[in-house]
Amino acid sequence: MCKGALLQVGFLLLVLHVPAQGQGPRGSAPQTRNPHGPISIPCENCHTLTSWKPIRAVPEFDHNRETKYPLLGMHAKVDCVQCHTKLVFSNVSTRCSDCHADIHRGQMGANCEQCHSVIGWNVSLQAVRAHENRFPLIGAHAAVDCIACHKNGASGQFTGLSTECYSCHVQDFQNAKTPNHVVASFSTTCQACHGVNTWFQANFDHSATGFPLTGAHVSVPCASCHVSNNFSLTGANTACSACHMKDFQSATNPNHVLGGFSTTCQTCHSTASWTNATFNHNLTGFPLTGAHVSVACSSCHVNNNFQLSNGTCIGCHQNDYRGATNPNHMAAAFPTDCTVCHSTSSWTGATFNHASTGFALTGAHISVACASCHVNNNYSLTSTACIACHQTDFTTALTPVNHAGFPTDCTLCHNTVVWTQGIFNHNNTPFPLTGAHTSVTCTSCHVNNNYTSLPTDCYSCHTTQYQQTTNPNHTTAGFPTSCQSCHTTTAWTGAVFNHTWFSINHGNAQGVFATCHTNSSDYSVFQCTGCHTAAATNPRHSGIRGYVFNSINCYSCHP
């Protein structure tokens, strides 16, 4: 049959297939009923004359634009007849459940899109978000297949499941060996130790047991303490010795058993550093100071004797006391209270507080060797007088004078700061030194080393000056020997006489004694008439009974 004939037959079949709907307008060919509803595209866009049933692609029909149901995800690749199975293209439901059978047996409701999406039916972000309402999927739960938890047949169980870890991890609990959870009677509250992010790296909060893990306990394996999976230590002894008794018994440095040590290990040890024990010696009543801090325990606690009761230095340093030679402690009968001179900071550099003996060391005494005073280790001295040690110095002294007649109280002139430059305080004697006396040599007054019987009057030392003085002549004038009447120690030669009755400046005298006392050899002789002449005096005394013009009569009336 030719091609034209086939086309005619196909056309007839098409006409016969579609029943008549009545005549078309104006005598046109009769119209056929459209079984596809509102689809208005030509039939040949989907059908062929060769085969009516197979439907070819319809590029002209845009399902996303011309319908209310965009084709997304897998829907864009599926054949039309898989959804439009009865070739119904109008009033088709858009609910997932109309096309997809509910394999969950109504457990999840009819709203498929609360878990699934057309983009990815099996991998659904919505499903994860929906899960957060009751059991958030975090950690390893976020990557596990739903059916791994929601088991019970191919359709799974999605309702009535427990949110407790143990409900899914029973076998993990029962099969655990490190440690054995069943034997150890561990709690089935898995989250007490495990986390959803790292299930195998369990972290148990030991503080909740009343025994916090510190120091080395943090990293030690559980089995080290919980032997034979014994984790049921309710009310157990938490003392260190409960686990470390063997350590206590085998310790040799020092030996804890022989030393009678307490089993309260934390007194010396800590979990941070068990082997580097630190004992607080202050608790014994004998604090460690100075060199005692770093000395080995066995130096004092010989033969593991830690039950010492004597806290004095001599208890350990008896041999040091007996062997000391600088100075010899035994020969000197030193007290056995070592702390009087020694300290734990510097044992060999002993410092004795000499002030405690009643004789404080000052000046040169501070640095002098003890043996200089304590000859032959004689430390039982009783005299604190300087002469007791300085008798030789006193006897042999020649500068400034021989001390033979001096008092033996050295402190009158000497001090411990400058011994050789003695300074005598003359003020301590009945004759204080003033003026020129302060700088004169001692021998000028203390002739022939006479320091004991010298008089204190000026004349006794200044007799020669008195006798040789000519201006005025003290001897012929009959001056008194009380030199201090006119002289002072400040200016001996510039004497000033206290003229009792007349001012030495009387008239025109101007302090010149010869004006009145014309005889320098006799100051009892004086004259008034030299200045007061008769011509000036007589008229003023006219009529005065007994008036005689001479010096004696003048003085009798005008003393």
Image (spheres, helix red, strand yellow):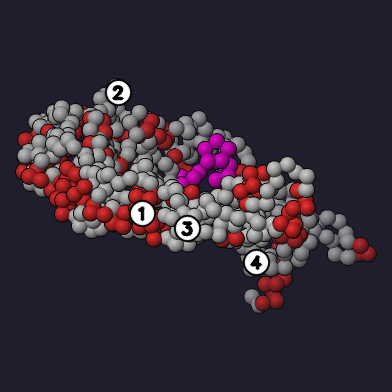
Q: Closer to us: mark 3 or mark 2?
A: 3
Residue positioned 20% across, 57% down in the render: 398
Q: Which residues are magenta?
A: 126-141
Q: Are the residues flagged by discs 4 and 3 in contact, CB closer than 8 Å? A: no
**Type of amino acid at the residue the image marks with label 3:** Ser
**Type of amino acid at the residue the image marks with label 4:** Ala
Q: Mark 4 highlights which residue?
A: 57
Can residue 318 be spotted in the picture? yes
Which quadrant of the figure has residue 107? Answer: top right
**Type of amino acid at the residue the image marks with label 2:** Thr
Residue at the extreme top: 235
Label 1 or label 2, whichever comes before in sequence order: 2
Residue positioned 34% across, 34% down in the render: 212
**Type of amino acid at the residue the image marks with label 1:** Thr
**Mark 3–mark 2 distance (CA, rounded to whole Å):** 132 Å
Q: Mark 3 highlights which residue?
A: 521
Which quadrant of the figure has residue 438? Answer: bottom left
Label 1 or label 3, whichever comes before in sequence order: 1
Q: Nearer the viewer, residue 489 or 37?
A: 489
Label 3 or label 2, whichever comes before in sequence order: 2
Residue at the extreme right: 26
